[in-house]
Image: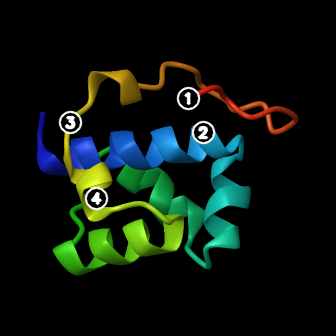
Amino acid sequence: MSLKEIVGMNLKYYRYKAGLSQEKFYSNLGLSYKYMAAVERGEENITSEKIDEYAYLMGVNIRDLVNYDASHVVTKRRVDERKKVNS
């Protein structure tokens, strides 16, 4: 798995953990949800500065976004915004 795929997987995990759609989650952070959707899918290369910025905005450590953790694999296609996903 490439670094961009790992970062995307972790971004998706923390968004699901917050119980928010891409649009709502990334708009709340001031980021383009369309671009971030491509990042989540591992389609976009992002700089280490951007990874650091996203970690800061999400309130996690940069290690949380760049380390592979099999428990962070999200298989659901849509998030239910009415309830948060259990960690």
3 or 1: mark nearer the eye: 1
Give, as a three-letter code, the residue at label 4. Glu
- Mark toward the start of the polypeptide (4 vs 3): 4
Assess whether mark 4 and mark 2 are in contact (beta carbons under 8 angstroms). Answer: no
- Look at the numbered disc 4 and give the secondary structure of its residue: loop
Assess whether mark 1 and mark 4 are in contact (beta carbons under 8 angstroms). Answer: no
**In the visual, does 40 lie left or right of 34?**
left
- Between the C-alphas of marks 4 and 3, the distance is 18 Å
Q: Residues within 10 Å of mark 3 (few under 14, many from 20)?
A: some
Q: Is residue 26 above or below residue 68?
A: below
- Mark toward the start of the polypeptide (3 vs 2): 2
2 or 4: mark nearer the eye: 2
Give the number of the disc on residue 68.
3
Give the number of the disc on residue 16.
none
2 or 1: mark nearer the eye: 1
Q: Dot 1 corresponds to which residue?
A: 87
